[in-house]
Amino acid sequence: MRKVWLWGLISVIALLSACSSKAESVDNQKGSSKKVQKIIVGTGTQFPNICFINEKGELTGYDIEIVKAIDEKLPEYEFEFKTMEFSNLLLSLETKKIDLIAHQMEVNKEREEKFLFNKEPYNVFPLKVTIHQDNNDIKSIDDLAGKNISVTPTSNSSVFIEEYNKKHNLGAKINYGTNTTDIINQLKTRRIDAIISTPFATKFYNEQADAQQKVVGDTLLNSKVFFLLNKDETTLSDRVDEALQELKKEGVVSKLSKKWLGADYSVEF
């Protein structure tokens, strides 16, 4: 009887062990099916208060902190930043070296044809004519006739001024540059007459680099900005939208905008 009892006990232990191993195997399979997907976020380092390197050598700014907040809302993704020149962002997205662009991307026809914008905007981008603080001759865009203007290639600023120049026969001379420091110095030393910028960028440069800039005239573009993805990233885009909607309801987007941009630019300004 004792032997029978022992064999029975051994059989039960073996059965429980097998069940335990099977359950562990199933759990492991479930865990592997929920593997975190890394998302490479393309951004820059030259956009004041948006994406820049602070005095501690850290990448930060409005777009950076928004992405970090979204990352916390989406456990199935891990967002990692990759910095580069603005002019390289679209090519890097097209060649899938990055998965998403966070750099105040406004909608235009060329971008819409190639890429996917998420649906929920996270900022409204007010572009204005920006000149030297001592310049009292230029009061609006129409005063730029025959003047030298500097813009970043492929930006909405460049697209806007190119189209306005042709449509209104403005005769402005458009220069293209990617070095922000050089552009600031050119405007400060009056080698160029104007740039197309934002009130928050102007404020930042004046405080940090004595840029001696001021904005004038009406807002040229008050367009909403989004993240930019490849066409096949619909699931990621939808999840980003869901996270943004939650962050807006919680007041996080408004708070970050006030902190980095000086006002709530998450709504039309």
Image: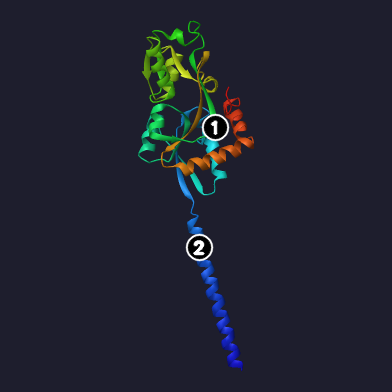
Question: In whole angstroms, how far apart are the C-alphas of marks 2 and 1?
Answer: 38 Å
What coloring was used for the rendering?
rainbow
Name the kind of residue labelled 1 in the image: Tyr
Residue 262 — which label? none
User: Where is residue 46 drawn, in percent x and y?
Assistant: 46, 28
Mark 1 burial class by Cα count in 10 Å: few <14, some 14-19, many 20+: many
Q: Secondary structure at mark 2?
A: helix
User: Where is residue 123 drawn, in percent x and y?
Assistant: 54, 29
The quarter of the image holding the N terminus is bottom right
Q: Are marks 2 and 1 in contact (CB under 8 Å)?
A: no
At horizontal 41% and vertical 42% (from top left) the residue drawn is: 232
Which residue reaches farthest bottom? 1
* Residue 85 appears in the picture as rendered: no
Which residue reaches farthest right? 250
* Residue 261 appears in the picture as rendered: yes
User: Where is residue 234 drawn, in percent x and y?
Assistant: 46, 42
Residue 122 — which label? 1
Mark 2 burial class by Cα count in 10 Å: few <14, some 14-19, many 20+: few
The quarter of the image holding the C terminus is top right
53 is higher (above) or lower (below) than 138: below
Q: Nearer the viewer, residue 269 or 137?
A: 269
At horizontal 58% and vertical 81% (from top left) the residue drawn is: 12
Q: Secondary structure at mark 1?
A: loop
Name the kind of residue labelled 2 in the image: Asn
Residue denoted by label 2: 28
**Pointer 2 or 1: first along the chain:** 2
User: Where is residue 141 drawn, in percent x and y?
Assistant: 46, 11
